[in-house]
Amino acid sequence: MALLAGSTAAAQAFIVLLSPVLTRLYGPREFGVFGMFTAGVLVLNTIDSARYEIAIPLPREEEKAEQLLVLCCVLVFVTGALLELAVHFWGTKACDLLQVPVLAPFLWLLPASMVSAGLIEAFSYFAIRKQAFRAVAQSRLAQSAVQNVVQCTLGLTGIGAIGLLIGDTLSRTAAAVTLARGAGLRRHLRCFSPVELRRRAAEYLRFPRLNAPATLLNIAALQLPFLAVPFFFGMEQAGSYFLAYRILFLPSTLVGNAVSNVFFSKAAAAEKDGTDIEGVTTKISLGLMAMFLPLYVALALAGNPVFQFVFGPKWGSAGLYARLLTPAAFAAAVASPLSTLLVVKDRLGQSLALTVLDLAARCLAIAVGVHFQSLWLTVVLISAFGTLVPCFALILFLRWAGVKLTPLAKKSGLIAWRNVPLFAVVGVAATFGPPLLATFVLVGMVALSCWLSSAFIKDLATAS
């Protein structure tokens, strides 16, 4: 976990440090196009290998895992070829239907980006099985470095939104190549007969049958605003929302994925061995709360001045959206890494139900916001529903792991209580001080708060 968390922290720092440069090289309109493109990639990535990749860590026999890996690669390339044909014949018509013709000239990049994303997923799960966490860490660093360097370099030429998209596509390709080399996949990507691959596909059919729809609906729920906001509120507002979401959910996504990968490996091993996972689930839950509570409360207090100072005056609305979304970001940061228990405990039916609930809530939020023609109200409702659903899911995850909720709640309260004085300092600086002071106070207080909370969690782990 230290290896993955360290690498993802470095990748995150690289992205955060260069984000102010990107927001000065590209405007809200370009970021709106970038948001729609990445939303499309993420939605397509849920179906390109039919979710067989998450079954890779589960078989006891090594040959079965290798067959699943090859099956995923075949499915990804076949899906990519079909997508290329669809883009060629119907891409422009689809953009016109969605009232985003500005996206049509860039669709040729979509199949390549989706294929790279699909390979990253398959390779990552095989690396998790092998506990080759160093390879996963290196791939994330490579993806972050390539994306930011290419996007900044192309942005200096004034190339426009295509610079953001090319950087994103090349970064995924670099991550896939790095992961393949680091995990030594050449030794495992053997040629299996179609009969063997069909046998593995039939054996793990429950994953495309149950988990694929759940994952597709989950990603659709998360990416729905990036598709709906440009349609109903315009591309510039979509760009501001995308920047706020990207910055706000960046820590939880990167660090949460690192924690999720390690937790999945440990939980799957414990389930196969019949051992208890209550202890590791408790410590990871408290650790996530201690890590993310200071950050998101501080951003809720000082989001506006910090965003305007760091990203430029034209991104003031992004700061407002970030403040509104902080409760949802915090809830997702704690609940998402534990969601692998749905696979470990074979709760795929519950996974589908939770996803349908989340998607329905987000559709309701957007429908109400569109009815009142208010993007502010839309974001408020997205944040409210995006907080309630993960909290409900978190309670289910903890109960499945055998965690006692009352002692956990008391320890979580102690973490929050220790941060109250620091939150007061951030609030005063944001309210009465200039943006520069608010930014420095926020960074300093968050660092100090995380250190104090981490020390608390370390003492807790030692005592247990």
Image (cartoon, rainbow, N blue to C red):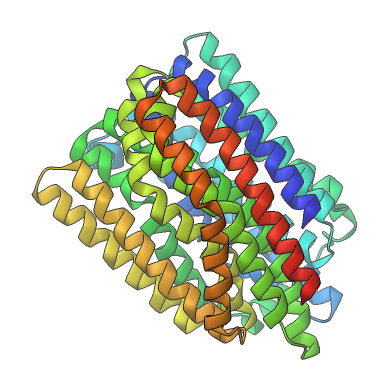
Question: How many numbered marks appear?
Answer: 0
In the rendered structure, the answer to whether residue 301 lies left or right of residue 210 reads left
Task: Determine the residue positioned at 77% across, 88% down.
Answer: 275
In the rendered structure, the answer to whether residue 175 lies left or right of residue 82 reads right
Quadrant hosting residue 126: bottom right
Nearest the viewer among 4 and 432 is 432
Which residue is the extreme one toward the bottom?
274
User: Residue 391: where, in percent of width, then height?
Assistant: 43, 70
Q: Is residue 105 shown above or below 186?
A: above
Q: Does residue 335 show up?
A: yes
Q: Does residue 88 show up?
A: no
Nearest the viewer among 4 and 105 is 4
Q: Is residue 375 shown above or below 365?
A: above
Which residue is the extreme one toward the left?
372
Task: Determine the residue positioned at 64% across, 80% down.
Answer: 344
- The quadrant of the image that shows the N terminus is bottom right
Q: Is residue 55 shown above or below 458?
A: below
Task: Determine the residue positioned at 75% across, 43% down.
Answer: 7
In the rendered structure, the answer to whether residue 220 lies left or right of residue 279 reads left
- The quadrant of the image that shows the C terminus is bottom right
Q: Is residue 369 shown above or below 37?
A: below
User: Residue 298: where, in percent of width, then height?
Assistant: 47, 42
Nearest the viewer among 267 and 217 is 267
User: Residue 141: where, in percent of width, then height?
Assistant: 73, 38
In the rendered structure, the answer to whether residue 255 lies left or right of residue 363 reads right
User: Residue 247: where, in percent of width, then height?
Assistant: 49, 38
Which residue is the extreme one toward the front?
421
